[in-house]
Image: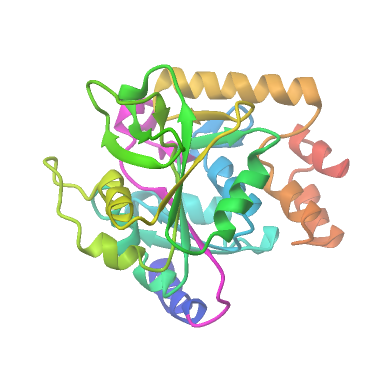
Amino acid sequence: MIGNILADDIGVIAEQSPTRRGIILAGGTGSRLFPITHSVCKQLVPVYDKPMIYYPLSMLMLAGIRDILVIVNPRDLAGFALLLGDGSQWGLDIFYAEQERAGGLAQAFLIGEEFIGNEPVCLVLGDNLMHGDALPEALLSASERIHGATVFGCEVGAPEQFGVVELDEDGVAVSLEEKPDVPKSNYAVPGVYFYDEKVVDYARCLQPSARGELEITDLNREYLKRGELNVELLDDGIAWFDAGLPDSLAEASHFVRGIQQRDGCKIACPEEIAFTQGMIDRCRLGDSIVKYEGTPYGEYLKQL
């Protein structure tokens, strides 16, 4: 029933407000985290003191995005709807769509075709976490570029584990590879991607890879081939975690705990982002304070 209601609502939204849409891909089985994710969706697992999905959600909010589609495994829809609701508590409009089976990251644009309409869109992977003083500016800058695609490059120690972008001496993308045995650079492409309104058409023309999926690297190659791919190198002060493995999940939790205890702040607090950006007023913030009364999270919200 939720899916039917949201399908109707998406049609209305797609006809209104010409602004960038946001998609969080939170489907799949989370098999790399088994047995943790046998009974709970990966993106609902905590990263220190908040559900994992709060982190990609906050990235979209920092990019100025208000209309968000969360793509989930059918078995997990109720859990996400209970946690996130319709997003109004944060001044957002959140919708849901089901991914029946894993079909690759680029499948998100075919699932979300009606939601995207003719607008630019940002896709964030549900297990990616970023933090740094320069992050909001980087996200806003990418979001404001409405032509072509924009991805980020992050220098890493083991690029063979990720999609890798090769740059020329002027910082222009030359090639893209998915988990290459011999990487041509140390710049991995994190799981946050900005595309213009042509992304659905490009995704529809992709051929499945050897593993039968529509690969995001192939989509980015299509933009590269057309001279429409922008690559922004992340500032050294921006941390990036792919929290889809036990070790990286633990590292992300340790990082968040350390920053929050050191600085007295909270990373990826949707209420704080919404309030400081004027998306909600103090009355709406008060609703969340009441909801989390008696918890450290609620006490933090009281200080805003």
Quarter holding the C terminus is top right
Say which quarter of the image contains residue 266.
Answer: top right
Q: Is residue 15 above or below residue 127?
A: below
Asked whether 42 falls inside the magenta stretch, the response is yes
Give me the residue at 28% from left, 68% from top.
201
Residue sitting at the far front: 169
The stretch drawn in magenta includes residue 85: no
Q: Between residues 168 and 225, which one lies in front from this camera angle? A: 168
Say which of 226 and 162 sits in front: 226
Is residue 301 placed above or below 46 in the rendered structure?
below
Query: What is the count of numbered marks?
Result: 0
User: In percent of the image, x 15 and y 54: which residue is there?
Assistant: 207
Asked if 273 appears above or below 163 in the picture, the reply is below
Front-lying residue, 120 or 84: 120
| Residue 242 showing in the rendered view | no
Residue span colored magenta: 15-43
Picture layout, residue 258 above or below residue 78: above
| Quadrant in which residue 176 is drawn | top left
- Can you name the residue that lies furthest to the right here? 303
Left or right, residue 74 beside residue 139: left
Query: What residue appears at the point 47 percent right and 61 percent down from the top-left corner?
Result: 121
